[in-house]
Image (spheres, coloured by chain):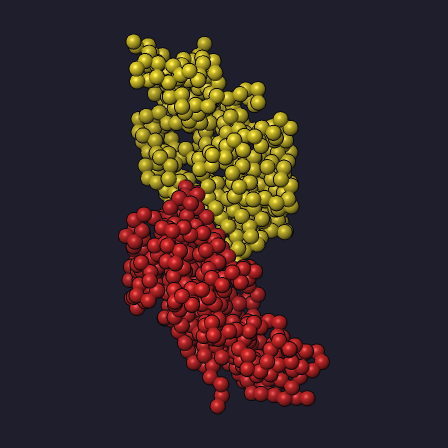
Chain colours: A red, B yellow
Amino acid sequence: MEQTIPNREIILVSYADEGPVTDAHLKIRETQLDIGNVGRDGSAGDVVVQNVWISVDPYLRHCMKKSNDGLYLQNFQLNQAIKSGSVGKVVASSNSEFEVGDLVAGLLQVSEYAVVPGGILRKIDATVAKPSDYLGLLGVPALTAWVGFTIIGNPNPGDEVFVSAAAGSVGMVVGQLAKIKGCRVVGSAGSDQKVKLLKEEFGFDDAFNYRSETDWDAALTRHFPRGIDIYFDNVGGRMLEAVLNHINMKARIPLCGMISQYNEEWKQRYGVRNLLNLVGKCAKMEGFMCTKYFHRRGEFVEEMTGYIKEGKIKYKEDVKEGLESFLDAFNSMFSGENVGKPVIHLTPPP
Amino acid sequence: MEQTIPNREIILVSYADEGPVTDAHLKIRETQLDIGNVGRDGSAGDVVVQNVWISVDPYLRHCMKKSNDGLYLQNFQLNQAIKSGSVGKVVASSNSEFEVGDLVAGLLQVSEYAVVPGGILRKIDATVAKPSDYLGLLGVPALTAWVGFTIIGNPNPGDEVFVSAAAGSVGMVVGQLAKIKGCRVVGSAGSDQKVKLLKEEFGFDDAFNYRSETDWDAALTRHFPRGIDIYFDNVGGRMLEAVLNHINMKARIPLCGMISQYNEEWKQRYGVRNLLNLVGKCAKMEGFMCTKYFHRRGEFVEEMTGYIKEGKIKYKEDVKEGLESFLDAFNSMFSGENVGKPVIHLTPPP
């Protein structure tokens, strides 16, 4: 039995190995989604999800490249819908674990509707946090912050913490975790508005604008007279190099990603010249992908839910409406125009 | 009471911040060493040591700079004798723990004789190993290898291990420890003679000459079809960058030092462009100074003494005679002309 619904999805039509992603790479395609077979032979367990919130994250940049250049993520297939973390509503189900109306989260097609096996979905509880928080405070960005800061950073009360891209989806959580753990924390961000946000909304001890402060060495000297114990690196490149001249003995540098470098092929990236500081300071630099820490998600959710209930942690989203806004929202992370975590809201058709 | 003996010592007459160290920086000075007060008021506990073996190590390069550039070592004072690890014989003592004739090791003036407080000396046991081994297999180079490889590298049987400067004083121990721990190990070195030494004397599974193999990426692809789990880095720079494209998930990179970069001021050093691999591979790069691990020396000596007694580990020294040979021995480490750990032997005057 054929039963179709009109659908729209974002597809990758050509790989973008270098430079900004444009509408020559990503396009919206209108299709008819066949949901008539859901629950029939061969698709038992499938669920039809209507997407409501779609996460926009820097790592997606790597899935849009043909070549592998450091993150080793699987690249998107050409002319197929790209995927991202989403929260949606079940509109049809052949899976006994999901009912129509359930709110679910998962890595889904960036589209209005998606037919997926129930096994990739998690039910979410809108009484604990609002649905879009499952893409932020209770989702991958905060898990990333928690893994990097608490597991790799191993903070002690009184530690001096620096966070780059501090107003980003991960950075703003790192800063708040640092305060909860009794550290002093300073962040860098790309506008005065973001600097204000860090200090006034997220409780950072201090922050600076890395665009107007061109001498980062001087900025770090001023902000860290006692040196840096933990540098949560979101940007790589020149900022990482600047920080390496300010680290303390036994410093920890969780490497979360290097957004300043993503639009470049690796040989064109900024070369860090002062790694010898790691030797003299007996310091550690450790990369991580939060997907390798999913086994610790229970622990994370419990801790984070506690902070949310106690009002100890906040989050800021940069909401854009409709699939049409995806490309702009995506590029805003690289230009730094976003304020808060970019997320796409899809309004169901009337 | 004045009692002097003729002495010769190596002094630093000017700092060498960049480029090779020459006889414009290091000079031999002839002096008269006053040993008449040893044991008198104010010098109780002093010991007069006649140096027999003097260690020549890369880190000394940093003590000869005025500026600090990553290792944070204290620089030598101008016009004073430089210091290095030494093994010598007690020729006079006002310290109840040392008798004339005792063999001792410590960080001493690079000179024929030195007057030092007994507290900085350790007695050595020439029945366990020959005296110069206390500057190698039972000294700082092997402790460095042991700390970096076993504590930071955390080897598992079957791990794929790569060592640069593998024929150096630290590298040759790393390779042998890797075999003892059940790993597969490949080393790079700067001559065919050294490559032969690694394979035939030290039991490396394979080795290559980094001077004749100019395409290091190709060499690593050939030698590590299954990738690299532990890279023991002695050189930094371009080799470190080449290795980063070959690491496995959860790889460990102990950073021991970066001899390829020591003669350059930090801004002139090679910039490593592909640190993003650390993120994608959830890999760790950790620097260390063996001085920070002296509290584990007992454990190290016990393990290493066992290997020596069982004949499981070998060492190769590159012995030069006389203080006059110090500068050449030192520079040989940077040109790669040394074969084995450089050590200076001093013959007592007739």
Instruction: Relative to B267, say whether A26 is above or below.
Output: below
Query: In this view of the protein, which residue sits in the foreground, A268 or B283?
Result: B283
Residue at 50% x, 27% y is B135
Query: In this view of the protein, which residue sits in the foreground, A108 or B322?
Result: A108
* Residue A142 x, y percent position in the rendering: 46, 64
Query: In this view of the protein, which residue sits in the foreground, A268 or B153?
Result: B153
Q: Is residue B59 left or right of residue A110?
A: left
Residue at the right extreme? Answer: A41
Residue at 40% x, 55% y is A181
* Residue B118 x, y percent position in the rendering: 40, 21
Instruction: Relative to B205, say whether A195 is above or below.
Output: below
Q: Is residue A27 left or right of residue B21?
A: right
* Residue A133 x, y percent position in the rendering: 45, 71
Residue at the bottom extreme? Answer: A350
Residue at 63% x, 89% y is A3
Q: Is residue B39 left or right of residue B201?
A: left
| Image quarter in which the C terminus of chain B is found | top left
